Amino acid sequence: MSMVSNDDTSGFQAKYTIKEVLGRGASSVVKRCVEKATGKEFAVKIVDLTGDSMTDTDDVTELYNGTINEISVLRLLAGHPNIIELHDVFESSAYIFLVFELCKNGELFDYLNRVVTVSEKKTRMLMRQLLQVVEFMHSRNVVHRDLKPENILLDDDLNIKVTDFGFAAIVPEGQQNSFTDLCGTPGFLAPEVLKQSMYQGQPPYGRAVDLWASGVICYTLLAGYPPFWHRRQMMMLRMIMEGQYSFAAPEWEDISAPPKALIKALLTVDPAKRITATEALALEFFQIGTQVEEACN
Ligand code: ADP
Ligand code: MG
């Protein structure tokens, strides 16, 4: 992306020096940057509103509104140790700069690609943190709607930081399910989201979609491959809607029953019967090694 140096962007550039690219999203680029006054490093998400890549002005408006939504949700959730911290925001007519705390260890996705599979012990640690974040978000009526290993970052101590609240939405007070739009990432989409967009007269969906995505993540951590996959996407979506997955050998042979019970409870097709984050955290899998395990490490 070419950085135009006009008055608009000078606010950000006066305070920060831009460094290398850390990652990319659909309509943003994330770069490392250094705060000039302190020498402290951050990650800046630069959202391009110039429409270079977009032909439709509606898309620009949607991107703008989406980014404003992301900022307001981040502020609503600020202070939780496992949610990415928004440090600073700059807005111009061409760009929005979101300055975040830097996660040097990158995405859980890359970590997974390096290690292939994660031990039960490490999965317990990661999933406990993830479900605690989900429990916290849901208590504030926020549904993330795009949980996946690309949107979970790792800090220096391999603690998770949930990021990318671009699709996050707020459930109106006193309502359980209120969304009807199709958003998220195919392999992580809950059956009720797919049914909503494919069939007439389906009920709206809500918080439970984040628990489904957590189930997909937990399965992937332990197996090294996702629960629902088919080279034809339509077939994959059908498998999701039918809850068709298996604990196949050899990968699952040596994995104990408690994490399988967690996955089964999370990957429940009926959202009304799917467990909540609070219920998930009370399952047997999380009762092992709370203090003892951590004290030994
Ligand atoms: P998008 O909404 O466009 O998907 P994200 O917020 O998901 O953008 O950021 C895109 C990518 O940039 C992430 O998947 C990650 O690789 C990288 N990234 C984002 N924020 C940080 C951060 N705070 N520290 C390190 N890398 C980051
Ligand atoms: Mg993303």
Image (cartoon, grey):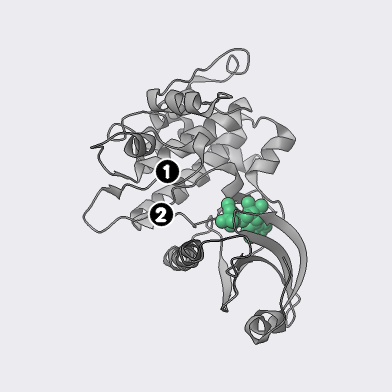
Q: How many other residues sit within 10 Å of disc 2, few (<14), some (14-19) or many (≥20)?
A: many
Q: Nearer the viewer, mark 1 or mark 2?
A: 1
Q: Is mark 1 within 8 Å of ligand 2?
A: no
The answer to whether 290 is drawn above or below residue 54 in the figure is: above
Type of amino acid at the residue the image marks with label 2: Met
Q: How many other residues sit within 10 Å of disc 1, few (<14), some (14-19) or many (≥20)?
A: many
Let me know if residue 112 appears in the view.
Answer: yes
Front position in the image: 176 or 166: 166
The answer to whether 249 is drawn above or below residue 40 in the figure is: above
Helix, strand or loop for disc 1: helix
* Residue 239, x across and y down, in percent: 45, 23
The answer to whether 50 is drawn above or below residue 284 in the figure is: below
Q: Quadrant location of residue 40?
A: bottom right
Per the rendering, the mark at residue 260 is none
Q: Which residue: 71% across, 80% down? A: 13
Quadrant location, the N terminus: bottom right
Q: In this rendering, would 44 be left or right of 89?
A: right
Type of amino acid at the residue the image marks with label 1: Asp
Q: Would you name the residue on which mark 1 appears?
A: 210
Let me know if residue 103 appears in the view.
Answer: no
* Residue 149, x across and y down, in percent: 59, 43
Q: Which residue: 56% across, 75% down? A: 89
**Which residue in the rendered view is the most extreme toward the bottom?**
7
> In whole angstroms, how far apart are the C-alphas of marks 1 and 2?
10 Å
Helix, strand or loop for disc 2: helix
Quadrant location, the C terminus: top right
Q: Which residue: 43% across, 25% down? A: 238
Front position in the image: 45 or 26: 26
* Residue 181, x across and y down, in percent: 36, 48
Kindly check if marks 1 and 2 are in contact, taking CB atoms under 8 A apart as contact.
yes
Q: Would you name the residue on which mark 2 appears?
A: 137
